[in-house]
Amino acid sequence: MSNLTKNIIWAVITLIVISLVFSYFVGPQTQPKTLNLDQLVADINAGQVKQIKVNGNELDITMTDGSAAIAQKEAESGISDTLKNLGVNQQALQTVDLQVVNQSGWQFWAGILVDPILTLLIIGILFWFMFRQAKTGVNQAFNFGRSNLKLSNVKDRVFFKDVAGLREAKEELIEVVDFLKNPQKFLDLGARIPRGILLMGPPGTGKTLVARAVAGESNVPFFYISASEFVEMFVGVGASRTRDAFMQAKRAAPAILFIDEIDAVGRQRGAGMGGGSDEREQTLNQILVEMDGFDRDTRVIVLAATNRPDILDPALLRPGRFDRRVILDLPDMNDREAILKIHAEGKTLEKDVDLRRVAARTPGFSGADLANLMNEAAIASARHNKKSIGQPELLEAAEKVIMGPERKSRVISQKEKEITAYHEGGHALVAASVKDADPVQKVSIISRGFAGGYTMKLPSEDQHLKTRNQFLADLSMMMGGYVSEKLTFGDISTGASNDLKEASELARRMVVKYGMSDLGPIVFGKTEQMMFLGQEISNEKNYSERVASEIDEQVRKLLMHAHDIAEKILKTHKAALKKIADTLIEKEVLEQDDFNAVLKPFKIKPIAA
């Protein structure tokens, strides 16, 4: 319910209450008996009337027993004449106290005007409300084609110094800032002004933040809208909103128009299942026309963001529209540390907090993930009634973002706890023994998310490439839990199902995608970029059935090789496996230093972190 409707309802209720209160005080509090004139005459003759007050045409009667009554006299004649005509006894009338009361002006007019004024006022309010609703509907109809373009608040401006990392992206965008500030310098040299810049990168990498920083550095208005807000179920509305958005940006030039998630309307035309959406394609066509229709000296830059550049229409990416494509990568370790420092501003950290260590624990985290990590750490500290955020809360928050919260309340039997300990011990021991594996950071048998336990291994530095030996080490580590259960208990559990699934998928990618098998340097299969319900649904099979059989054999060969390596390690170091499992059963969690201390007596030198 809108505020206007609430105000009208309260106004009507208030008027009704005032009317009732007024009537209560002006009128009598008890309802008197009503008499006609014949009854009044009979009561006077019987000596039952004590007093009569004449108030206009109304007669206020007081009986001898103290009760009250009212009557109405004839308007044309006085009370005495009226009673005389009806045969009143003159001697009986002389015993009655007869008084004439003159009405005051306000009582007279209030009695006449209160009821009609209240009625007219209520009717007027109702008509005003109906006309206002109708006017709002008309305005909405006329504004239906207006874009829901938002202008960023000046107080919310950010600058490049507020964006950690993304050095190359910021260098590309500095030229845009320079153009918006000094366009003539470029125009005098005959340079063509960039009309659109496409920001591409995974979710959470800061595409919107960078766009806002460009506006902040340029000190120009920043208009922003999501591409999905252009599209409506009515054909032509999206194109109309597009025209309106560009018109507003041109009026405020120099300005930046930021379109978020442009793939919502910018998908390749004619590539959808079931014929596609005519409204979406008309909206895209209007965007293409508006961008190509800019004057050479128009000082409006269109920034757009997407994490799916592969599905955008080629016409949108050609020169003259989105001239530049700026890629925003996931931050490396140094950038993650810088991002953590930015999000740590305004938060109280303990003196021994090492953000570098947190950055090392968070490979693959985006800027949004790191912001969430700092917030989770602050919440955890407040929950523990701490005045500052410590290293344990930060590391716990990192694991919570990756795998979910700990489920300490989950009750498991001693047997299941033992199986989990040997399972995770197998993973950790194989990872510590294989040459190309990543260092083990933590081993836990406390359930987190859907996992009964977990072994955290992370590279000591950011990796952009992985070798075949590294993949083989990962496969061996994945097989460690399965082999450990089999060797220790002579049986296997469902706890290894996810490990086997991940290992099978990795082995198949090594064969068909990376060319890391005996079949040679060849890639098998071709995935079409056709999307339906968010998933790829077309996978072209460009190889024969015989080759498919060979692929399956190569996948099995890689998995069995990893199994044999894990089995050899665990058979050789049975005592170390038992020690790890026993320690896990006792402590439930082993950090990196604790894990290395357990391995030290067995002369197993873990991979250096």
Image (tube, rainbow, N blue to C red):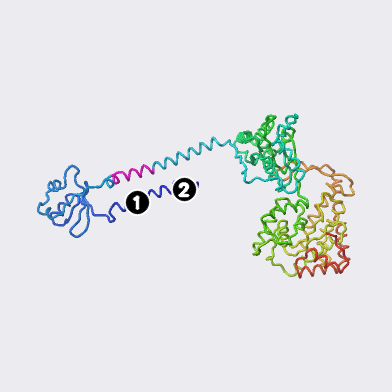
Q: Is residue 79 magenta?
A: no
Q: Which mark is residue 20?
A: 1
Q: Secondary structure at mark 1?
A: helix
Residue 500 falls in image quadrant: bottom right
Q: Earlier in the sequence, mark 2 or mark 1?
A: 2
Query: What residue appears at the point 82 percent right and 49 percent down from the top-left corner?
Result: 464
Q: Which is nearer the eye, 67 or 542?
A: 67
Q: Give neighbour class at mark 1: few <14, some 14-19, many 20+ (Cα, 10 Å).
A: few
| Place of residue 25 in the rendered image (x, y in percent of width and height, measured from the top left) | 31, 53
> Quick one: label 2, few (<14), some, or many (20+) residues within 10 Å?
few
**Frontmost residue, 183 versus 399:** 183
Q: Nearer the viewer, residue 297 or 494?
A: 297
197 lies above or below 7 = above
Residue 269 visible in this rendered orientation of the protein: no
Counting every numbered tag in the picture gives: 2
To which residue does mark 2 refer?
A: 6
Occupied quadrant, residue 328: top right
Q: Is residue 562 visible?
A: yes
Q: Is residue 356 left or right of residue 56?
A: right
Name the residue: 43% across, 49% down.
Answer: 10
Question: What is the spatial separation of the Cα atoms under label 2 and label 1, in whole angstroms?
Answer: 21 Å
Q: Magenta residues? A: 109-122
Q: Which mark is residue 527?
A: none
Q: Amino acid at mark 1?
A: Leu
120 in the magenta segment:
yes
Location of the C terminus (image quadrant): bottom right
Relative to 491, is 545 above or below? above
Predominant secondary structure, magenta span: helix
Image coordinates of residue 235 in percent, x first then y, are 61, 34
